């Protein structure tokens, strides 16, 4: 598995740069990951990021946008404002989780 | 006498009932299956009938006729499960007690969950192919289709048979070519994911199947509404995709009684242990088939393999022993790619679909590669489904995924 150096640390990532070891993540790392894709994290950004992390602990899967909206209580529209264009992909990247995937 | 109640007589419920009837003594156990009607459909045919690959009369049979005589079958709506009291409340006002409960009521397309989807054009220029009525309506629209924009759209994951939309666009390309209207047609594949293929090996091996057929992909599209008057679908980030014929996969949800019983997640799927299908809330409840929250494809093969593991575990559980069998998430799916060819996928929780060969007694089949043998296998499976799988007879397919024949690729090493 490839590794890369982010914020001075060795991190395991996949070919697209998503973390493959969710436990290597912390909030400091999230700041750097967000900066990598041109996002400055505000309090509003942290709410879905924290939801994704907490949800992953029990579900062992990255929450879909619908789940962030219905369970996390953050409207999809707002997620598109916070993480323009590709909220599902951008949120999971910053939260140190795998992007939502299909079966192929 | 102990009672096992099975809610749902579809693929998983029927298989579980028949297999357990053979394992549980009739004088000690009664098994009752509840379903709302007597229609058991061979669901893969929903995709084939609109293209004339299967006939309408090949789809539907009597549910009861596939359930063993030693099992009671009742037709009723399910209102609610009271898990504390171990009671099922039925639509006719009666209640049914149980010692163990299997929830196997599947997943259902819910067009009502997207604003505008169920407008006056529903089943006219806006279609789905996950129901019997939807299949019939789409067959007619495809027959009448004379060109324009054909849009295949997925609302949100998870969906039943997640490869079906890909099969649909490839079969449509083939069908419209033979009909002579392909040149006048634009086919667009709209997905909430970041591409039509999201797993590395499958992306590499299958990516060209869409581009060589001139099928355009619109990724990261999270639908907000359907505007049937303007004939567009709109996303939350205000993109519009225009259509002349829209074929959508509506949001998939588990049954409403699951929510009414407090036993479901946000999509009414029953949270279960992914290796045993046992409810995480009640040890005497299991959810089998598409209605559970197993983190793998909602597919008949998953129902089949997980039921085999479940039956062995259940027999241990009722004797007070620990459950020693573990489901690995094994799925095995044929993917029709048009022109009389199909691909074969074989994967589980840990292993993504890989290339190579799938060992079968009748001869190896190619994985992730379009072949005629795979297509013949897919068509033959309808007979296997009715005559071997549902009755609970053994098939030469192992519940546990095998790495035999699979080409394992070395992981890329960072420079």
Image (cartoon, rainbow, N blue to C red):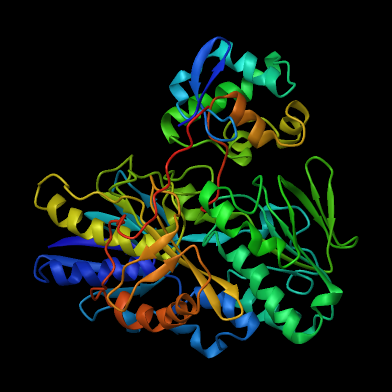
Residue closer to the observer: B206 or A67: B206
Residue B303 occupies which quadrant of the picture? bottom left
Above or below, A96 against B1 in this view is above
The structure residue drawn at horizontal position 78% and vertical position 51%, both measured from the top left corner, is B225
Q: Position of residue A84 (x, y in %)?
A: 77, 31
Q: Is residue B333 above or below residue A72?
A: below
Indicate whether B181 appears above or below B8. below
Q: Position of residue B374 (x, y in %)?
A: 46, 75
Q: Is residue B103 above or below residue B21?
A: above
What residue occupies the far right of the structure in this picture? Answer: B230
Placement of the N terminus of chain B among the 4 image quadrants: bottom left
Q: Is residue B69 left or right of residue B199?
A: left
Q: Is residue B104 visible?
A: no
Residue at 56% across / 57% down in the picture? Answer: B205
Name which residue lies at 36% across and 51% down.
B329
- B180 sits to left or right of B23: right
Residue nearest the observer in this picture, B49 or B259: B49
């Amino acid at each position: 598995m490839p590794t890369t150096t982010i914020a001075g640390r060795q991190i395991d990532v996949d070919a697209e740069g998503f973390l493959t070891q969710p436990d290597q993540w912390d909030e400091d790392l999230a700041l750097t990951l967000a900066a990598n894709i041109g996002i400055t994290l505000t309090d509003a950004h942290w709410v879905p990021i924290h939801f994704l992390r907490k949800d992953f602990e029990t579900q062992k899967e990255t929450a879909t946008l619908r789940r962030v909206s219905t369970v996390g209580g953050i409207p999809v529209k707002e997620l598109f404002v916070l993480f323009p264009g590709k909220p599902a992909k951008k949120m999971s990247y910053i939260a140190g989780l795998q992007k939502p995937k299909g079966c192929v | 006498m102990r009672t096992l109640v099975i809610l749902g007589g579809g693929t998983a419920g029927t298989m579980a009932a028949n297999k357990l009837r053979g394992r549980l003594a009739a004088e000690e156990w009664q098994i009752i299956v509840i379903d709302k009607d007597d229609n058991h459909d061979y669901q893969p045919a929903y995709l084939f009938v609109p293209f004339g690959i299967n006939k309408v009369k090949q789809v539907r049979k009597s549910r009861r006729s596939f359930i063993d005589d030693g099992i009671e079958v009742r037709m009723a709506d399910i209102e609610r499960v009271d898990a504390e009291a171990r009671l099922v409340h039925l639509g006719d006002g009666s209640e049914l007690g149980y010692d163990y409960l299997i929830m196997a009521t599947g997943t259902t397309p819910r067009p009502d969950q997207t604003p505008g989807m169920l407008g006056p054009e529903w089943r006219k220029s806006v279609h789905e192919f996950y129901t019997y009525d939807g299949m019939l309506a789409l067959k007619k629209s495809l027959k009448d289709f004379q060109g324009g924009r054909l849009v295949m759209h997925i609302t949100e994951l998870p969906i039943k048979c997640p490869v079906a939309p890909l099969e649909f666009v490839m079969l449509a390309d083939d069908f419209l070519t033979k009909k002579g209207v392909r040149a006048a047609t634009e086919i667009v594949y709209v997905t909430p994911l970041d591409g039509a293929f999201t797993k590395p090996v499958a992306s590499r091996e299958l990516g060209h199947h869409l581009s060589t057929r001139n099928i355009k992909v619109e990724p990261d599209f999270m639908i907000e509404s359907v505007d049937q008057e303007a004939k567009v679908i709109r996303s939350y980030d205000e993109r519009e995709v225009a259509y002349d014929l829209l074929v959508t996969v509506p949001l998939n949800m588990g049954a409403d009684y699951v929510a009414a019983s407090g036993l479901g997640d946000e999509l009414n799927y029953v949270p279960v242990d992914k290796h045993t299908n046992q409810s995480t809330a009640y040890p005497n409840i299991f959810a089998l088939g598409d209605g559970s929250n197993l983190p793998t494809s909602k597919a008949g093969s998953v129902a089949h393999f997980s039921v085999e593991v479940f039956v062995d575990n259940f027999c241990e559980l009722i004797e007070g022993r620990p459950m020693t069998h573990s489901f690995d998430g094994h799925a095995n799916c044929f993917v029709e790619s048009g022109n009389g060819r199909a691909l074969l996928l074989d994967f589980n929780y840990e292993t993504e679909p890989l290339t190579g060969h799938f060992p079968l007694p009748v001869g190896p089949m190619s994985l992730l590669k379009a072949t005629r043998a795979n297509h013949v296998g897919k068509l033959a499976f309808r007979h296997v489904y009715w005559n071997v799988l549902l009755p609970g007879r053994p098939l030469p397919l192992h519940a546990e995924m095998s790495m035999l024949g699979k080409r394992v690729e070395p992981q890329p090493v960072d420079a």
